[in-house]
Image: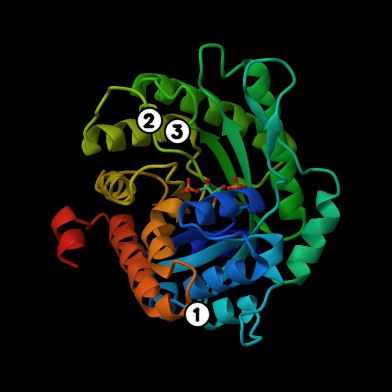
């Protein structure tokens, strides 16, 4: 079993490719649509995702896997073709978001705990039957005056480990996503604080993964980059962010992990690309680094689509451009000039 999990993980980390996170929950997609004055309907959600998945050039060349929701995993395009078949044609691995969301922790620290373990074993069996090769569970770690607490870090790390071992039991590669949130409230923490919290979180996550018996060669890590909070006045250079992020990962992520695919976490499209490219220029890392972006891959495509099927070609061109730029970043060969010129 471990061998096939490792081969799925390796394929997700194929050189020059990364993961498209298209697993917005109902609440999140409603927010994204509201920004472009669209209602959150089943047909619009289907059209939007069809536009992305039928971006053939992007899918074939730059995307190794797509994180889907339960709805999308079983959905069809407007012409009746299953989304799974469209992804299979482009040799893209379907993944599934299996957490049920992050809910307030008891107490008043403002922290969240991710739920979704009840019945997960049965759900994973069904997702495996539907062809899901990997899964995702996101833990949200808050930074404020009192957070993160040890209790919250341990609870989230424990849940991630229980999720990960159940995935491996079902033959599904767990993508383990502990996100130290940078764009939450108050969001005024420093880069150094983010580095310290990210390190502590990763330490606890790998401790719990080991205790649970998770095979590290059959999983992927989806972390945040080390950044100051969005309301901080610090303005680190791209190189500082890259250096700090890689050094925290080096200290806390075992070399046995076959790959790291970052979330974008509210960075601008270009920042997310620039940071990834700079990290890939740093020599001697034990794992490949790529993207598993939601917003930083979709922002422009979403606005260009604007809810109209006639805008598919333009929106697909925008998505393909972003996917291409992030593919270059995964190779460490992206440049701002190239991005603008294209
Ligand atoms: C696409 O957004 C994902 C789902 O979030 P919700 O469950 O809150 O709707 C999210 O988990 C995503 O996969 C990652 O956080 C990466 O997304 P960004 O936009 O940060 O790159």
Q: Which residue is mark 1?
A: 90
Q: CA distance from mark 2 to mark 3?
A: 5 Å
Q: Residues within 10 Å of mark 2 (few under 14, many from 20)?
A: some
User: In the depicted view, which residue is nearer to us: 213 or 131?
Assistant: 131
Q: Earlier in the sequence, mark 1 or mark 3?
A: 1
For the residues labelled 2 and 3, say whether their Cβ atoms are less than 8 Å apart. Answer: yes
Residue topped by disc 2: 230
- Label 3 belongs to which residue? 183
In this rendering, the answer to whether 45 lies above or below 236 is below
Give the Cα distance between marks 2 and 1: 36 Å
Where residue 272 sits: x, y (%)? 34, 47
Q: Residue at x 58, y 68 (%)?
A: 44
Task: For residue 17, say whether it is visible.
Answer: no
Residue 66 position in % (x across, y down): 54, 64
Element on which disc 1 rests: loop
Left or right of 208 in this view: 140: left
**Outermost residue toward the top in this view:** 146
Is the C-beta of the residue carrying label 1 under 8 Å from the nearest atom of ligand 1? no
Q: Quadrant of residue 319?
A: bottom left
The CA distance from mark 1 to mark 3 is 34 Å
Residue 224 figure quarter: top left
Name the residue at 61% across, 42% down. 138
Say which of 221 and 284 sits in front. Answer: 221
Q: Report the residue that reaches farthest toward the front.
A: 37
- Foreground mark, 1 or 3, reads 3
């Amino acid at each position: 079993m471990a061998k096939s999990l490792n081969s799925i993980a390796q394929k997700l980390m194929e050189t020059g490719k990364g993961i498209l996170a298209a697993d917005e929950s109902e609440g999140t997609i409603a927010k994204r649509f509201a920004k472009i004055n669209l209602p959150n309907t089943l047909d619009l959600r289907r059209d939007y995702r069809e536009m992305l998945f039928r971006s053939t050039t992007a899918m074939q060349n730059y995307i190794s896997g797509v994180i889907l929701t339960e709805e999308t995993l079983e959905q069809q395009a407007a012409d009746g073709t299953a989304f799974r078949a469209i992804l299979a044609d482009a040799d893209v691995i379907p993944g599934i978001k299996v957490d049920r969301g992050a809910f307030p922790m008891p107490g008043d620290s403002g922290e969240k705990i991710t739920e979704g373990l009840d019945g997960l074993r049965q759900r994973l069996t069904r997702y495996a039957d539907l062809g899901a090769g990997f899964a995702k569970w996101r833990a949200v770690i808050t930074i404020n005056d009192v957070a993160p607490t040890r209790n919250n870090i341990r609870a989230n790390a424990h849940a991630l480990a229980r999720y990960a071992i159940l995935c491996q039991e079902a033959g599904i590669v767990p993508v383990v996503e502990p996100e130290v949130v940078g764009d939450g409230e108050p969001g005024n923490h420093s880069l150094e604080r983010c580095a310290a919290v990210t390190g502590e979180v990763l330490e606890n996550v790998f401790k719990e993964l080991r205790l649970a018996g998770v095979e590290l060669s059959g999983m992927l890590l989806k972390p945040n980059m080390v950044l100051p909070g969005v309301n901080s006045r610090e303005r680190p250079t791209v190189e500082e962010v890259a250096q700090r992020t890689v050094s925290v990962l080096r200290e806390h992520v075992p070399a046995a992990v076959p790959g790291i695919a970052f979330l974008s976490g509210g960075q601008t499209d270009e920042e997310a690309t620039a940071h990834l490219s700079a990290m890939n220029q740093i020599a001697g890392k034990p794992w490949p680094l790529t993207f598993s972006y939601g917003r930083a891959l979709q922002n422009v495509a979403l606005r260009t689509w604007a809810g109209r099927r006639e805008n598919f070609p333009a929106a697909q061109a925008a998505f393909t451009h972003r996917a291409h730029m992030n593919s270059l970043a995964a190779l460490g060969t992206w440049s701002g000039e190239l991005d603008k010129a294209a």
